[in-house]
Image (cartoon, grey):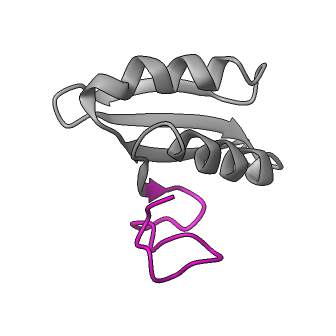
Amino acid sequence: MDVFSRRIYVQLNRKDIALFKFLLESRDNLAYLTVIDKYKAVVQVVCGYGFEPEIHEFLSSAHKEMPVKVVYDSEQGTMAAGRRDDPGQPGVF
């Protein structure tokens, strides 16, 4: 089965969902966002394969504006253990 997209589930503060969406949309077709749980502030970011460096750069830059925690990444198929360059920070950018 061919898979053409990657899904990353991110937990934010509820008040930051709109800002996160605005910042993501400003990156011109990098990915799209769906709110999965508005009470727990979990959003799904869907992007095409090959955009991993851009997505990680986006998440790092978004973390400068708000707390960003990756709770699931479809690339690993399990709960995200953390950033690739900092395994001591579980899923937090």
Q: Residue furthest front?
A: 64
Q: From what the image shows, is residue 54 above or below residue 25?
A: below
Residue at (42% x, 17% y) in the render: 18
Using the rendered view, name the quadrant where residue 91 is placed: bottom left
The answer to which of 61 and 76 lies nearer the viewer is: 61
Instruction: Indicate the position of residue 73 as horizontal and vertical percent values.
Output: 51, 57
The answer to which of 33 and 12 lies nearer the viewer is: 12
Q: From what the image shows, is residue 88 above or below residue 4?
A: below
Q: From what the image shows, is residue 84 above or below residue 6?
A: below
Residue at (65% x, 77% y) in the render: 85
Residue 84 on the magenta span: yes
Can residue 1 be seen at all in this image of the molecule?
no
Q: Residue furthest left?
A: 39
Judge left or right: residue 9 versus residue 25.
left
Instruction: Indicate the position of residue 8 as horizontal and vertical percent values.
Output: 52, 47
Residue at (34% x, 39% y) in the render: 12
The answer to which of 35 and 1 lies nearer the viewer is: 35
Instruction: Indicate the position of residue 39 as horizontal and vertical percent values.
Output: 16, 29
Q: Residue furthest bottom?
A: 88
Judge left or right: residue 51 versus residue 40.
right
| The magenta segment | 72-93
Residue at (39% x, 46% y) in the render: 67
Can residue 73 be seen at all in this image of the molecule?
yes
Using the rendered view, name the quadrant where residue 92 is placed: bottom left
Judge left or right: residue 55 versus residue 73.
right
Instruction: Indicate the position of residue 3 as horizontal and vertical percent values.
Output: 69, 47
- What is the count of numbered marks? 0
- Main SS type for the magenta part? loop
